[in-house]
Every structure is written in C-alpha cells, then in structure tokens.
Amino acid sequence: MRRIVIPLVLALGMPASAQADEVVVFAASSLKTALDQIGADFGKATGHRVTISYAGSNKLATQIIAGAPADIFISAAENWMDEVAKAGLVVPETRSDLLGNALVLVAHGAGAPQVEIGRDLDLNGLLADGKLSMAMVDSVPAGQYGKAALESFGLWEGVAPSVAQAENVRDALKLVALGEAPLGIVYASDAVAEPGVSVVGTFPSDSHPAIAYPVALLTGAADQADRDFLKALSEPAADAIFAAQGFKVMK
C-alpha cells in the first residue's frame, strides 16, 4: 500500500508555501498601546510575528546606529530619524510622517481641576513642593517638546529645579499615575492610555515644535513581511486604532 504523507502546513490549513517571518520594530514609547494592538492584529491575519522594542527615540536611534537588528523605526521626532538616515540605515523612499500628537499637562487621579496654560500659569503653586514629571528634556522628544513649551511661556527657569526626568515618556506618565509626582507633561495619547491620570490642560501647538512621528524601513529589512507591516501601519484599520488612542493620523 502506498503511504500518503500530508505536510503539516496543509494539515493545519495553511498553504505549503507559507512561511512565518519576524518583523522587528523599534518604536517610541508613546506608541505602545496602539502599536501592540496593530502588531497583534497583523500577526493574526498573516501568521508573521511582530516584535516591538519600545524606548525613547534617542535611545532607539543610538542602538540602530550601533548595529542593533531592526526592520522598521518609528521615531517621535524628525531629528532622531534624521540621525539614522545620516548613518545610511534608512530606505529613503519608505520614509513618511505617520502620526502627530499634542502635548498635555496631566495630574494624578481623576477629576483634577482644569488650568489655562500660558504665561500666568503658577506651576510651582500647583506642584506644592512636588515634582513635575517629564521625559529627559535634552534628549527624549517628549521632554524636548515640553521644555520648549515651558520656555515659550517663560516658565522653564522657575520650574526646572522641580522637574523629575524619566528615561522615556511612558515612565514619566507612570510617576504621575502612581502619585509620585502630582503633575507631568506627556503626549495626549499617553493620557488616553493611562486611567490613573487626568488631563488638566493642553499646550498650544505653537508653543513647541510640531510633533511628528516619522516611520521608515531600515536597510537591514530583508523580508516581504517587513514591507507588508510598514504598509499596514497606514491602512484604515491602523488609522482607527491610532485615532482612538489620541494620535493625529497624517495623510
């Protein structure tokens, strides 16, 4: 009797030519909630695995330039994508601005009173000897935007001694959510993702450089799955997830 061998992939209902690949994404910390969902949905639909490393854009860019294996980079600022491009590691025609965001002042807990953000804002009075939580102001985009906004209103010098700097914006958010800092400056999308804080004010968009999230395929990307995931980031399903998390979808 002739024995018939059925390949495992066919037994599982997958095409014999199907091959699962890994897509490695380096992404700004503020993207975590939305990007985790998009990556999971892509994995379920395609069988590919999406591995995402989150950190401050400065740290990720430095790691990529130093040779860390990554297929896609999503930065929270143009300057760090520029640094990776200068190193010859970005596929130029794949670079685009994926998202925008807003900068907000958050307070611990729910129902905190609203404030008007401007030159007359008494930040030190609101802090009451507590700390203002921010991402690192000299290197992490959220911290750089926040410092620029405070400087535009002449508030930075007065509050600088009270600033607690975190390694990335999600860590800055966590300090406020845990009550270790009464106030923090984060992205609007971070506030959406964390029920332990409330937004008490939004910084005017002209008080800081425009917030943009450039995305690009990196030169080490070798699989079609990498390009497919890059494309998926701009499709309607991803747009809806990003928008629900407080991002501004850029087209």
Image (tube, rainbow, N blue to C red):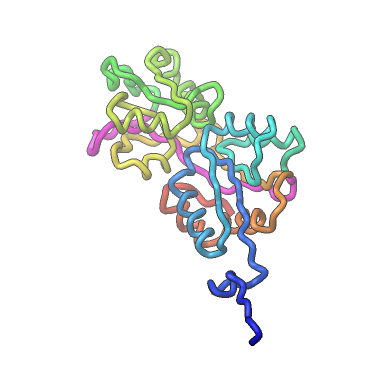
> Which residue is depicted at the point 72% across and 42% down?
90
Q: Position of residue 66 (x, y in %)?
A: 68, 30
Q: In the image, 126: left or right of 102?
A: left
> Which residue is depicted at the point 63% across and 77% down?
5
Q: Position of residue 12 (x, y in %)?
A: 53, 72
Residue 149 shows in the view: no
Q: Locate the N terminus and report the quarter of the image it occupies.
A: bottom right
Q: Locate the C terminus and report the quarter of the image it occupies.
A: bottom right
Q: In the image, 231: left or right of 237?
A: right
Judge by depth and name the residue closer to the eye, 158 or 225. 225
Q: Position of residue 240 (x, y in %)?
A: 46, 58
Q: Which residues are magenta?
A: 91-117
> Which residue is depicted at the point 46% across and 44% down?
32
Judge by depth and name the residue closer to the eye, 83 or 120. 83
Judge by depth and name the residue closer to the eye, 8 or 94. 8
Q: In the image, 34: left or right of 64?
A: left
